[in-house]
Image: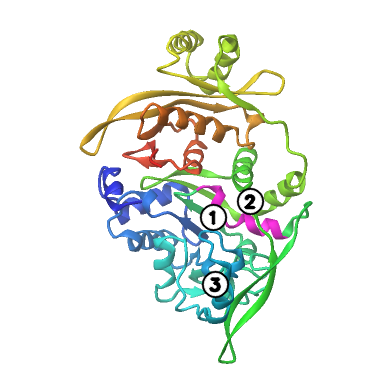
Amino acid sequence: MPERDVVERTNEPITVSWLVEDLRALGVTSGMTLLVQSSLGALGWVCGGPVAVLLALEEVLGGDGTLVMPSMSSDYTDPADWRHPSVPEAWKDTIRATMPAFDPDLTPTRSMGAIAETFRTQPGTLRSGHPHTSFAARGPHAKRITANHAFDYALGETSPLARIYDLDGSVLLLGIGHMSNTSIHLAEYRADYPGKEDRPTGAPLAIDGERLWVEMIDVDVDNADFTRIGDAFARETGLVRSGTIGNAPALLMPQRPLIDFAVRWMETHRGRDEPPQAAVRLLESTDREDWIRLRRELWPHYDTAFVETESDDIASHPDRTPVFVAERPDGRLCGMVEVAIRDAAIGCATNRVGYLEGWYVEPAWRDRGIGRALVERAEAWAREQGCVEMASDTTPRYPLSPAAHAALGYEVAKRKTHFRKSLAD
């Protein structure tokens, strides 16, 4: 995110002491083994940038705690697998023949963020030796976590993820959602599910002083269902703590139960027939009773008369406050999103902003992409009306809401219960 945008979305500088307070409030404690994955921009404007975040984490973990972060280098993989961006076929043999050998001290991370890259270079930080999926660690268990990381099956039983599991460590997602929850990959290696396959890969390594391209084998991993897994884990176990660090939505969870749950989930769901899906469409007059039922489930603290009166008001202004609903195969509704337009000051200009006024999916119909489909439909409508941003509010009544917003690209803005997302192409 551009630095100017971060400043505009932050009420006051976020300091080390602020971050320390938020980390402790979320449940991070002294002595933890903690795997942190993060987005610096999501935190807001931090005084001291990534250094301040590291100082805060180290203060809360104390001298007995061990801090771990991914330090992966995806640009050291086989160019045959590159997609973002891909390279011409004619280049690939040259890349394999000339790419410098992986060096744990020199090779930078890729797409890990400023916090992880700063941590990698901090004195006393150790890094595992895998050229694609290394991890960096600092603290009493750092050597145990980073040692003996085998080249084959990089996120499996020899990986730092497995050592964090052995140590009963925890995972902190800071400004990101479960889609990027690397720990769940360990479950892919342990689970038995239809379609599980190995794939060849390789990397440039220094062996006995000579630079060689080394062939490797690995599981063909896929994070497409990680959000469903993480959301189901939170809902069914109650082991995920949700809050904010700075301005960023944050999730804290024990890693071992997460992995065990993910193994069971994959063995039940992966490669099986998908459950029935729901169709997203505009609300119709015949949906009124079903729609009011969903609104009562979303806002049980409001009295029935208020919900019904407000429903009538929204229904009478479909152009101003459209409602998109998810219809089950049996014709009943299982989800909804209400969207409105407001004028808001953005920088020095006043622009149209779309607001998610109410967003809900029945528990039995979650983890199927319905919530995402509803919000994307609302965003598309708002974009057609000339809106440049989407906004949404939540309250502590909905502890999963920050993570759900983060998974759809929304970022905390100004206050911890308010989220925004640019609609710019």
Q: Amino acid at mark 1?
A: Val
Residue that appears at 71% across and 52% down: 263
Residue that appears at 28% across and 29% down: 344
Q: Compared to 341, does 312 lie above or below? A: above
Q: Compared to 219, does 405 lie above or below? A: above
Q: Amino acid at mark 2?
A: Leu
* Quadrant housing the C terminus: top left
Given the current orientation, which residue lies at the most extreme left position? 348
Q: Amino acid at mark 3?
A: Trp
Q: Is residue 224 magenta?
A: no
The image quarter containing residue 234 is top right
Residue that appears at 54% across and 72% down: 91
* Real-space CA distance between mark 2 and mark 1, rounded to the nearest whole angstrom: 9 Å
Q: Looking at this view, is 398 or 319 the one in front?
A: 319
Which dot marks residue 93? none
Q: Where is mark 1, residue-wise?
A: 171
Q: Looking at this view, is 313 or 213 the one in front?
A: 213
Q: Where is mark 3, residue-wise?
A: 91
**Are the residues flagged by discs 2 and 1 in contact, CB closer than 8 Å?**
yes
Which dot marks residue 258? 2
Counting from the top left corner in percent of width and height, residue 244 is at 42, 44
**Dominant secondary structure of the residues highlighted in magenta in the image:** helix
Per the image, label 1 sits on a secondary structure element best described as: strand
The image quarter containing residue 240 is top right
Q: Which residues are magenta?
A: 177-189
